[in-house]
Amino acid sequence: MFIHTQSTPNPESLMFHPDASWEFLKPEIFAAIMDFYSSGEPLFLYSQAAASKNTAIHDDDSETVAMIKELLETRIRPAVQDDGIENMLMYYVPEVKGVEQEMDAKDEEAELSGQVE
């Protein structure tokens, strides 16, 4: 399979364009998506549950993997949560000068009725 690429303004990223093989991949991709939906698994995990699932230390983890997971859970994740998305975006994308929350009518209604956490 050949993947055509195109450069972007960011020199560290590329834009990918599928070629004729998309006609062969499309049914496989849709089948995988439909298999997932028919499995009954939840589409989204709560962020805390997903985070703890990914960094849970298991008996078969090596000492190094266990140490990395512990660092992610105790140092990295709290630092990122404290620092926020704005600082991360401003660090990685110098053109970003600020981040503002944009809410649709449903979000605004929920906030006014006190349903937003």
Image (cartoon, helix red, strand yellow):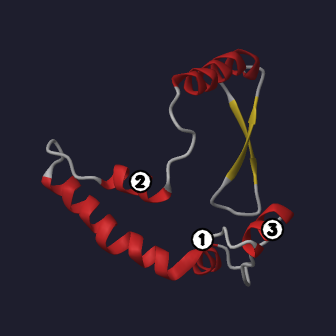
| Res. 104 image quadrant | bottom right
What number is the disc on residue 34?
A: none
Would residue 76 appear left or right of 34 to someone viewing this image?
left
Residue at 65% over, 69% down: 116
Crowd class of label 1 (few under 14; some 14 to 19; many from 20; radius 10 Å): few
Which quadrant: the C terminus? bottom right
Work out whether residue 35 or residue 9 is closer to the camera in this orientation and state it: 35
- Whichever of labels 3 and 1 marks the residue nearer the N terminus, that label is 3
Image coordinates for residue 39, horizontal then vertical, percent: 52, 23
Disc nearer the start of the sequence (2/1): 2
Q: Can you identify the residue that label 3 sits on?
A: 109
The answer to which of 112 and 6 lies nearer the viewer is: 112
Separation of residues labelled 3 and 1 (CA atoms): 13 Å
Q: Badge 3: how crowded within 10 Å, few (<14), some, or many (20+)?
A: few
Name which residue type carries label 1. Answer: Glu
Task: Residue 94 in the image: state x and y as whole percent.
Answer: 68, 79
Q: Secondary structure at mark 2?
A: helix
Residue indicated by mark 1: 117
Residue 31 pos. (x, y %): 63, 18
Farthest residue, direction front:
113
Quadrant in which the N terminus is drawn: top right
Residue ID at (29%, 71%): 74
Mark nearer the viewer, 2 or 1: 1
Give the crowd class for mark 2: few <14, some 14-19, many >=20 residues within 10 Å. few
Identity, as a three-letter code, of the amino acid under mark 3: Glu
Distance from Cα at disc 2 to Cα at disc 1:
17 Å
Q: Is residue 86 above or below residue 6?
A: below
